[in-house]
Image: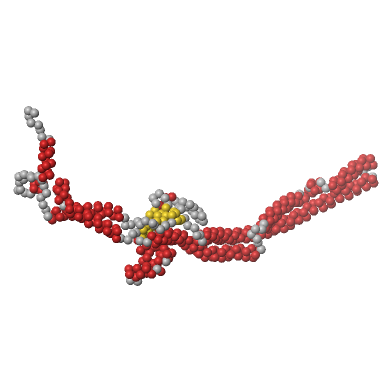
Amino acid sequence: MTLQQFLLILRARFRVICGVLAIVVVAAAAVSLILPKKYTAQAALVVDAKSADPILGNMIPSQMMASYIATQVDIIASDRVAQRVIDITGLDKQPQFQEMWQEATEGRGDIKVWLASALKSRLDVKPARESNVITLSYTGSNPEFVAMVVNAFAQAYIDTALELKVEPARQYASWFDERTKGLRDDLEAAQKRLSDYEQQHQIIASDGRLDVETARLAELSTQLVAVQGLRADSRSRQSQSGAAELLPEVTQNPLISNLKSELARKEAERDQLRGRLGPNHPEVGKVAAEIGSLRQRIGSETQRIAASLGTTSRISAAREEEIAAAVEAQKARVLELKAHRDSIAVLQRDVEAAQRAYDLVTQRLATTNLESQTQQTNVAVLTPATEPLWPSGPRLLVNLLLAIIVGGVLGVGSALLIELADRRVRGEDDLSSLPDVPILGVIPSAGEALAGGFLARLFRRPAEGY
């Protein structure tokens, strides 16, 4: 079909097209006027997802913001929020809604579920593209009712969001509370084991007995080394008892030194008397007797000193044995205290581990208790819904415009369908498409003839010779 044929068909079926268009427009106008008016109420919510949680202190990452807002939109459109709206408004207790539910379901199922589904079907939730604002829209025939429902949805969403935040915290708080009791018992048991061990062995974990006993052991060890040195020295001197006169105790003894000086003086006096009186003189014999007495005294004193060295050696040996036994006993005591201290350290570590676990769970319990008792959410009503003054539908002008478009399309379609059912010749192209039918001529219409004659005179060439 060429464009000329299409235009010829439209011109020939112009009345049909206008009739269909008029019918569609009149029907749309009638329906728009007959249908009850609809009102739309809107409320805006703002979700503060960028501020830190006042209890936990955590924040939502920026890359998860879109997902978080989408989750909030799904929560608003959930059955839980819709059923909470019914609880807030009490629609399930109103007779007209109960009658509607009876007619629709014949009393089957739950009225809250049916009403929630009906409310959700007229609710529109749209998040803003570049902000954290969520818009709630509800359409109905009663302006007061739609405003109430939108505000109820906003309040129900806030309450549900708070419940979703608080319920896990309450469950965790209950679990932490039970766990705290067990950890408290473990801590008390660990403290009791430590206390019983200290009382049994008469040891306090914080006392300095081990340091005192260790210092005493060091002192005894020092004394043992000193006594062992004295004993070794005594043995060395005792081994020299054959030459007792050469011992330092003998050479340094003042009495022996005086006796030796007296002996030297007497010997010198004897030599003088012997040279002057002769060796057999009584005076020489008297001095010789005194010299012998002095030598006897020096010898006895030297023997006494040598004998005292043996006594000192025996005393040193006994002292060494005594101190060595004390050192061994002190070592055993120190080792015993170290063993007790190690056992106490193990028990203390058990107490500290139990204390840390108990403190950690107690801290978490306090945090979850605070979180479970919070009444604040990160959602606020930015713009509450008000009763709409003007209806949002049906829109007469929009419906008429759509009716004109639809009516025009239906009219053209109807014209084409009628033309196909009743095919007629509309121009030269229709005749040229017929087989074995020559075209002898074309008779123009009156309008075309007039227009053609005027154009021929207008563009006619002038005759030669003019």
Of residues 156 and 388, the one nearer the viewer is: 388
**From what the image shows, is residue 183 above or below residue 21?**
below
Q: Is residue 140 visible?
A: yes
Of residues 342 and 103, the one nearer the viewer is: 103
Q: Residue at x 54, y 63 (%)?
A: 180
In this picture the colour scheme is: secondary structure
Where's residue 44, x and y in %?
42, 55
Where's residue 196, x and y in %?
62, 65
Where's residue 238, x and y in %?
76, 51
Q: Quadrant of the C terminus?
A: top left
How many numbered marks, from 0 up? 0
Dividing the picture into quarters, in which one does residue 323 lie? Answer: bottom right
Of residues 51 and 186, the one nearer the viewer is: 51
Where's residue 327, x and y in %?
69, 57
Q: Is residue 71 visible?
A: no
Q: Residue at x 4, y 45 (%)?
A: 440
Q: Residue at x 43, y 50 (%)?
A: 62
Residue 386 shown left or right of residue 7 in the figure: right
Of residues 450 and 378, the one nearer the viewer is: 450
Residue 69 shown left or right of residue 312 in the figure: left
* Extreme-bottom residue of the structure: 107
Dividing the picture into quarters, in which one does residue 210 lie? Answer: bottom right
Q: Residue at x 81, y 46 (%)?
A: 251
Residue 3 shown left or right of residue 139 in the figure: left
